[in-house]
Image (cartoon, rainbow, N blue to C red):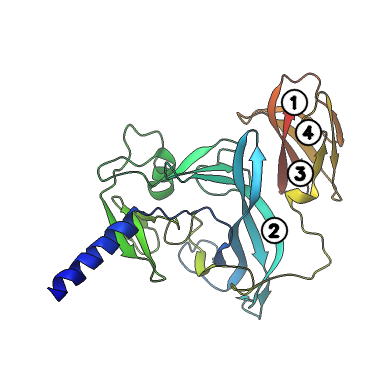
C-alpha cells in the first residue's frame, strides 16, 4: 500500500507539473554566449573567443496598441590573449534587437524583429509567430519555427510534432519538450533530435545563432545573483532610450532628440516600406495618412535604432 501511495503521488505531481505552463518571456533571464573565431574557409574549425554577449528581455514597450518586451543584446568584456569572457560578466553596450510578446493563455510567443535580428523570421517590423506551445502530437509546427530548425519556407505542409515529453533540461529542471523530426548538425554531420523547450526555447536559448556561437551560461535571477555588472565606462551606450521623438502621437511634424550623430532617418510603414528618408532631425509628416509608423535612425555605419510613432 505504501508503494501504491508513492506511485499515486508521483503520477499526480507529474500531471500537475505538466499542466502548468512555464512562460519564456520574462525579465531576469540571461543567455550568455561566446563567439569563436573561424579561420576563413574552415566552417567547422574554431579558434579563440572573438566576442561575447548576453541575450535578455527588457522593459515593457507599447507598440501601437500591443504590449511587447524589448529583446536586448548586451556586449561583454573579454580578457586575456585568447579572449576569454571576463567574470563577473561585464556589460559594455546594450542594443535593442526587436520586440517579443507572449500570450500565456494561448501559449504562443510572437517576435517583432528589427534589422539587428540576424536569425530567421527577421522580416523587419513584421510580427511572426515564433513558438506555439499549445500544439499536440501530430500538429504541424508553424512556418517560422520550421525555418528556424529546417531552413524550410513556403512549404505546403511543415514537420509535425512527433512527441511531447516532460524531461529534465541541461540544468536539471523539468520542462515540456516538443519533439519534431530532427535537425541537421552541420559540424557533426548527423541529424539531432529537433525540439523546443517550454519556458526556454531551443537548447541554446530562444533565438538561433551561427554555428560559431556557444551558450556558456544561463541564469535566472537579478544581475547580482547572475554575476553580471554594468561597465563603468564613460562611453554613453546607444540604446533606444537615448532617442526621443516628440510629439507622439503627432498631427504633422516630429522632432528627434538624441546625443548621437544621426547619419540617416527613414520613416517606414508597418509593411516595411520606406515612406521617406531624411537627414534632418525635424521631419514633416503632413503628407502621411493616419496610422502607425517606424522611425529608423542610422547612428553608426551599420547600426539602426528605431521608435514607433502614431500619425494622427
| Residue 1 percent coordinates (x, y) | 12, 73
Which disc, if any, is residue 311?
A: 1
Q: Nearer the viewer, residue 305 or 257?
A: 257
Q: How far is mark 2 from mark 3, CA to CA?
A: 16 Å
Point out the tag, 2 or 3, that comes first from the N-terminus.
2
User: Is 8 situated left or right of 204 in this image?
Assistant: left
Residue 284, quarter of the rendered image = top right
The label number, if any, that marks residue 185 in the structure image: none
Q: Which residue is mark 3?
A: 298
Kindly identify which residue carries mark 4.
Answer: 248
Q: Secondary structure at mark 4?
A: loop
Please give the name of the residue rendered at 37% of the width and 60% of the height, measured from the top-left corner. 175
Whole-Å distance between the Cαs marked 1 and 4? Answer: 8 Å
Q: Residue at x 54, y 73 (%)?
A: 47
Which residue is situated farthest in the front direction here?
1
Disc assigned to residue 94: 2
Q: Are marks 2 and 3 in contact (CB under 8 Å)?
A: no
Q: Position of residue 24 (x, y in %)?
A: 48, 54
Locate the C terminus and report the quarter of the image it occupies.
Answer: top right
Crowd class of label 4 (few under 14; some 14 to 19; many from 20; radius 10 Å): some
Question: Which of marks 1 and 2 precedes in the sequence?
Answer: 2
Residue 37 visible? The answer is no
Numbered disc 1: secondary structure: strand
The answer to whether 61 is drawn above or below residue 26 in the figure is above
- Element type where label 2 sits in the image: strand
Task: Report, in whole angstroms, how far the alpha carbon at label 4 lies from the one at label 2.
Answer: 24 Å
Image quarter of residue 63: top right
Front: mark 2 or 3? 2
Give whichever of discs 3 and 4 has the lower sequence position: 4
Q: Earlier in the sequence, mark 1 or mark 3?
A: 3
Q: Report the front residue among 126 and 9.
A: 9
Crowd band around label 2 with a 10 angstrom C-alpha radius: few (<14), some (14–19), many (20+):
some
Amino acid at each position: 500500500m505504501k508503494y501504491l501511495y508513492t506511485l499515486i503521488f508521483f503520477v499526480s505531481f507529474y500531471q500537475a507539473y505538466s499542466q502548468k505552463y512555464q512562460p519564456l518571456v520574462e525579465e531576469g533571464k540571461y543567455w550568455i554566449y561566446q563567439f569563436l573565431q573561424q579561420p576563413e574557409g574552415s566552417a567547422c574549425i574554431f579558434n579563440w573567443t572573438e566576442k561575447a554577449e548576453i541575450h535578455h528581455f527588457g522593459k515593457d514597450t507599447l507598440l501601437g496598441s500591443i504590449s511587447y518586451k524589448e529583446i536586448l543584446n548586451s556586449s561583454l568584456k573579454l580578457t586575456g590573449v585568447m579572449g576569454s569572457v571576463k567574470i563577473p560578466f561585464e556589460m559594455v553596450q546594450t542594443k535593442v534587437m526587436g520586440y517579443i510578446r507572449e500570450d500565456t493563455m494561448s501559449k504562443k510567443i510572437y517576435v517583432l524583429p528589427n534589422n539587428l535580428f540576424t536569425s530567421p523570421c527577421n522580416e523587419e517590423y513584421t510580427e511572426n509567430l515564433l513558438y506555439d506551445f499549445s500544439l499536440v502530437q501530430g500538429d504541424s509546427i508553424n512556418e517560422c519555427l520550421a525555418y528556424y530548425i529546417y531552413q524550410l519556407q513556403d512549404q505546403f505542409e511543415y514537420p509535425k510534432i512527433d512527441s511531447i515529453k516532460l524531461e529534465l533540461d541541461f540544468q536539471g529542471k523539468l520542462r515540456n519538450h516538443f519533439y519534431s523530426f530532427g535537425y541537421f548538425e552541420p559540424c557533426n554531420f548527423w541529424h539531432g533530435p529537433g525540439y523546443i523547450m517550454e519556458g526556454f526555447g531551443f537548447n541554446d536559448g530562444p533565438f538561433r545563432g551561427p554555428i560559431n556561437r556557444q551558450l556558456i551560461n544561463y541564469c535566472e535571477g537579478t544581475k547580482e545573483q547572475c554575476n553580471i555588472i554594468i561597465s563603468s565606462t564613460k562611453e554613453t551606450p546607444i540604446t533606444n532610450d537615448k532617442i526621443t521623438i516628440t510629439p507622439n502621437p503627432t498631427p504633422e511634424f516630429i522632432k528627434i532628440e538624441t546625443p548621437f550623430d544621426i547619419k540617416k532617418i527613414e520613416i517606414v510603414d508597418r509593411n516595411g516600406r520606406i515612406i521617406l528618408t531624411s537627414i534632418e532631425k525635424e521631419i514633416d509628416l503632413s503628407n502621411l495618412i493616419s496610422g502607425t509608423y517606424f522611425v529608423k535612425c542610422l547612428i553608426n555605419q551599420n547600426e539602426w535604432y528605431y521608435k514607433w510613432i502614431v500619425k494622427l
